[in-house]
Image (cartoon, helix red, strand yellow):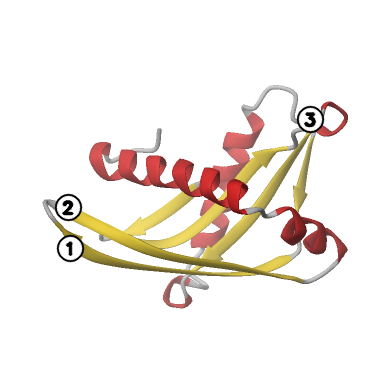
Amino acid sequence: MVGAFVERQLVGTAGFYRARSIKERHKGHVWGVYVTPAMRGSGLGRGIMNALLEHASRVDGIEQIVLFLTACRLTIKLRPSGAGSEADVTYTHTSLGPRGDEFVASFTEAHYRTLMRDWEFRINHFLEHGAAC
């Protein structure tokens, strides 16, 4: 997951994962590309995609990048909690075609929880160290 921040506010995201099956392991999938309305047209989306594709190019065995056809809505609300903060995350996908249908159908609760744990780890690492992990 790649995130773009402006003044510690998340303003854009994109996700990447490798197909799991042996037959499909040569494929990497891009999903969840989002830029906040205020940052659209600024080139941020291009920067996020460039960073994501640069990461994907370092994954051994990836020969093909697949873009999913879904529209997503991501809402993050931060609130103080003890010495830090907590985030309420709402994330929805709407399919825009057959490939999107497949993705939405495979987006199980377990998949979502794994994704959110990884995302949380990466965001916290960035906030703590000022750099991606």
What amino acid type should be assigned to the residue bearing mark 1?
Pro
Please tell me whether residue 112 is drawn above or below residue 96 in the rendered image.
Answer: above
For label 1, the SS is strand
Q: Which sits earlier in the primary sequence, circle 3 or circle 1?
A: 3
Residue mark closest to the camera, 3 vs 2: 2
* Residue placed under numbered mark 1 in the picture: 80
The part of the image, by quadrant, that contains residue 132 is: top left
Q: Position of residue 68 (x, y in %)?
A: 75, 57
On the rendered structure, is 102 left or right of 44?
right
What amino acid type should be assigned to the residue bearing mark 2?
Gly
Q: Quadrant of the C terminus?
A: top left
Confirm or deny contact between disc 3 and disc 1 (CB under 8 A).
no
Residue at 57% x, 52% y: name it.
Answer: 112
What amino acid type should be assigned to the residue bearing mark 3?
Arg
The residue lying toward the viewer, choosing from 47 and 89, is 89
The residue lying toward the viewer, choosing from 55 and 104, is 104
* Residue placed under numbered mark 2 in the picture: 84
- Category of crowding for the residue at label 3, using alpha-carbon neighbours closer than 10 angstroms: few (below 14), some (14–19), many (at least 20): some
- Category of crowding for the residue at label 1, using alpha-carbon neighbours closer than 10 angstroms: few (below 14), some (14–19), many (at least 20): few
For label 3, the SS is loop
On the rendered structure, is 98 left or right of 121?
right
Residue at 12% x, 54% y: name it.
Answer: 82
* Residue placed under numbered mark 3 in the picture: 25
Q: Which sits earlier in the primary sequence, circle 3 or circle 2?
A: 3
Confirm or deny contact between disc 2 and disc 1 (CB under 8 A).
yes
Confirm or deny contact between disc 3 and disc 2 (CB under 8 A).
no
Please tell me whether residue 36 is drawn above or below residue 130 in the rendered image.
Answer: below
Residue at 27% x, 41% y: name it.
Answer: 130
Q: Position of residue 14 (x, y in %)?
A: 56, 53
- Extreme-top residue of the structure: 60
